[in-house]
Image: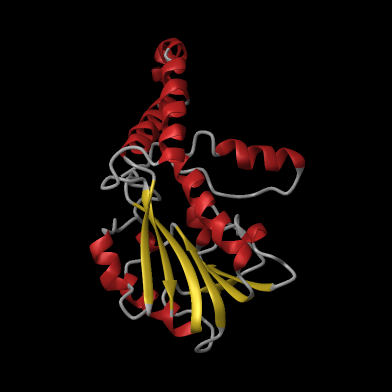
Amino acid sequence: MAEQFKPISNTRDTTFIGKIKFYGRMLLDLQILTIFKDLRNELPKYSGKVLDVGCGQSPYRFLLNEERTSYFGIDIVDADKFDYSNKDITPFNGEDIPFENEFFDGVICTEVLEHVPKYQKMADEIHRVMKSDATGIITIPWSARYHYIPWDYFRYTPSSLKSIFSKFSEVEIKHRGTDIAVIANKVIVLFFRNLVPAEKWKLIFLPIWIVLLPICGLITFIAHIAIIFDLGSQEDPLGYTIYIKK
């Protein structure tokens, strides 16, 4: 199955233009926006050794206090399948985290678990390498298209997440966005998929999509208001953030 509209790799360029692109992307990418908001609230509090599981290009590393933390990023050997190439990480087999027991004070894992066939083993491995009282933050999508085909396996309900992370002493599951943000997200993808179509013959419809762009802008504005004030149904969110403590 060919992927017609692949996700844009999540990277953070520290140049001025790169920062504009990073923060500007969040005007339209509501998944990234809600993930960033949750991480921004937590990561500056971290101290000690921090593990970033499936880190990709380590886009959120800058939220950690460099003076109080030591960063360890890991990703699969063939991360290039996900359009990532990060030399400053430890490659691993996607199952066994290559660190000793109770090594880390904090864990980050963003939008990774849906790509892990043996998800329970991954959760248990995270538990193994965390120190007693260590904390972690994990994000997963709920309403997201089939992506990075064929390495996209699961969507998790809060009920399943409680079971998966049952070894931890504390587990808090928070929704990210509501159905209003989900609808807007689908509309945004619809527009940009047609503004830059995979099949060139569809360019004949480009003027129509350009004329309709103000509608997309209005829907996006409404979505941002809904995210700020948590308006809409929480049962159909963009995704979930899981806060764990060993």
* Quadrant containing the N terminus in the rendered view: top left
User: What number of labels is visible?
Assistant: 0
Q: Tell which residue pokes out farthest to the bottom in this image.
A: 101
Colour pattern: secondary structure
Query: Does residue 197 show up?
Result: no
* 123 to 81, vertically: above or below: below
**Closer to the camera, 120 or 146?**
120
Q: Along the line of sight, which residue is nearer the eye, 141 or 234?
A: 234
In screen coordinates, is 134 left or right of 234?
A: right
Q: x and y percent of residue 31 in the render?
A: 44, 45
Question: Is 58 drawn above or below residue 36 in the view shown?
Answer: below
Residue located 37% across and 28% down the image: 187
Up/down of 176 relative to 226, above or below: below
Q: Is residue 188 visible?
A: yes
Task: Please report the residue visible at 42 percent of the width from the left and 39 percent of the height from the top.
Answer: 229
**Where in the figure is residue 158, as x and y percent of width and height?**
27, 60
Q: Quadrant of the C terminus?
A: bottom left
x and y, in percent, of residue 143 in the image: 32, 45
Residue sticking out furthest to the front: 229
Q: Residue at 39% of width from left, 35% of height from top?
A: 185
| 77 sits to left or right of 212 | right
> Would residue 245 appear left or right of 22 to someone viewing this image?
left
Q: Nearer the viewer, residue 35 or 94?
A: 35
Identity of the residue furthest to the left in this view: 159
Residue 2: % across, % down: 35, 42
Viewer-closest of 185 and 45: 45
Q: Residue at x 34, y 42 (%)?
A: 178
When the figure is inspected, residue 60 is found, relative to residue 216, above or below; the finding is below
